[in-house]
């Protein structure tokens, strides 16, 4: 009877499920690592991307890179070895890294949203308000606090207390930063409507070169803000299953169900961290500088016997006949 109860009240995965999860986490991790390395190299090598908003994006990319390099492999290991116990060190370390990354990601999104808010609503004061020094200090603060925040997981030993920990995590990592994001985007969209009416008025009159430059700058800032908005929307979409799992664990009074629902966390984590692999594609699709930088990086990745064909914005490696020795000189 005790054996049957232990089996029922277990978060253990069956073998096929563990293999599928390990495979999917591996694929997600590979895309996260590859895509975010492209983002970081693009920012480093492209002078036009050396701006405060892109430094915040770089911070986000580092967090997403750590997902692919560390968190996905940890979940692969947990899946293959079928480690589900909350008291196991591997579980605790995985959740420590998850909390650290979650904190870094959401607050990086909050800072870049506020940065876009200032760029759109305070065009002429933006460079004075958001300096490189303030940007770097903000990023450093987020990363230092994130490790302290994640370390709290090692202090929670009782598995039945974990739902309350996840509730605190949700408040700190979702409620606070997304309140900042909502505030920022409310005024971004409000200002965007005002600027659109202003542009229409200018187009119906004789515009000067200076006015046209201002319009182009405002349009670029709005597009950048909308791009970050897409990233935020995708993040919330992918994080939704984890939020539901947290709510179920908190609401239910069935301790056995709280243990069995651990299986759902394997899938919730997979979906949640998949957003790390999506962000580079959003940047490439929406921001010309990133798209051009990615093409340039690909040209270096291909061996010397390859070249890049970019007709119609399609990139592929084409084999070129091997050059003779006298042609290489």
Image: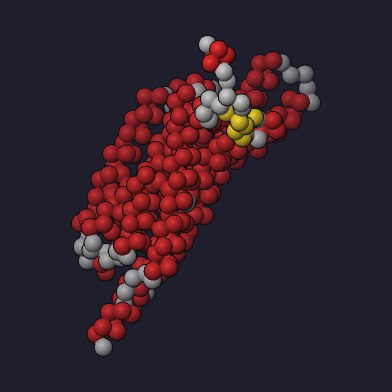
x and y percent of residue 11 in the render? 33, 71
x and y percent of residue 211 in the render? 67, 19
Instruction: Say if 97 sits above or below 225 in the image.
Output: below
Scheme of image coloration: secondary structure
Which residue is at the far bottom?
1
Would residue 321 be seen by someone viewing this image from the given angle?
A: yes
Left or right, 204 with respect to 10, comes to: right
Nearer the observer, 95 or 307: 307
Instruction: Say if 178 sits above or below 248 in the image.
Output: above
Q: Quarter-wise, where is residue 185 in the image?
A: top right
Q: Residue at image x 65%, y 38%?
A: 193
Which residue is at the far right?
204
Nearer the observer, 184 or 305: 305
Would residue 108 be seen by someone viewing this image from the given angle?
A: no
Q: Residue at image x 26%, y 53%?
A: 93
Q: Residue at image x 28%, y 48%?
A: 149
Instruction: Say if 33 sits above or below 162 in the image.
Output: above
Left or right, 207 with respect to 103, comes to: right
Nearer the observer, 151 or 24: 24
Q: Quarter-wise, where is residue 131 in the image?
A: top left
x and y percent of residue 34 in the render? 46, 40
Q: Quarter-wise, where is residue 254 in the image?
A: bottom left
Counting the numbered discs, the total is 0
Nearer the observer, 296 or 217: 296
Which residue is at the far front?
325
x and y percent of residue 229 in the render? 55, 43
Question: Which part of the image, by quadrant, shows the N terminus?
Answer: bottom left
């Amino acid at each position: 009877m005790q054996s049957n109860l232990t089996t029922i009240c277990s978060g253990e995965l069956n073998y096929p499920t563990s293999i599928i999860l390990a495979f999917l986490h591996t694929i997600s991790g590979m895309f996260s690592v590859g895509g975010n390395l492209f983002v970081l190299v693009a920012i480093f090598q492209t002078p036009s991307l050396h701006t405060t908003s892109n430094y915040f994006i770089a911070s986000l990319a580092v967090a997403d890179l750590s997902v692919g390099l560390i968190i996905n492999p940890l979940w692969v290991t947990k899946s293959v070895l079928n480690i589900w116990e909350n008291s196991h060190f591997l579980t605790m370390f995985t959740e420590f890294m998850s909390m650290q990354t979650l904190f870094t990601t959401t607050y990086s999104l909050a800072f870049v949203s506020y940065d876009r808010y200032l760029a759109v609503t305070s065009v002429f004061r933006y460079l004075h308000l958001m300096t490189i020094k303030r940007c770097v200090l903000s990023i450093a603060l987020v990363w230092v606090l994130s490790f302290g925040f994640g370390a709290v997981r090692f202090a929670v030993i009782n598995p039945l207390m974990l739902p309350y920990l996840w509730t605190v995590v949700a408040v700190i990592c979702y409620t606070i930063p997304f309140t900042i994001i909502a505030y920022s985007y409310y005024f971004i969209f409000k200002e965007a409507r005002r600027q659109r009416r202003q542009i229409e008025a200018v187009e119906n009159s004789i515009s000067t070169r200076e006015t046209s430059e201002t319009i182009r700058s405002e349009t670029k800032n709005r597009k950048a803000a909308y791009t970050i908005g897409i990233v935020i929307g995708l993040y919330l979409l992918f994080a939704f299953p984890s939020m539901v799992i947290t709510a179920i664990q908190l609401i239910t009074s069935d301790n056995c169900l709280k243990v069995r629902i651990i299986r759902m966390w394997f899938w919730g984590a997979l979906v949640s961290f998949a957003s790390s692999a999506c962000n580079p594609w959003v940047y490439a699709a929406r921001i010309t500088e990133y798209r051009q930088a990615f093409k340039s990086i690909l040209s270096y990745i291909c061996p010397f016997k390859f070249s890049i064909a970019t007709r119609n914005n399609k990139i592929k490696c084409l084999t070129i006949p091997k050059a003779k020795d006298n042609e290489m000189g």
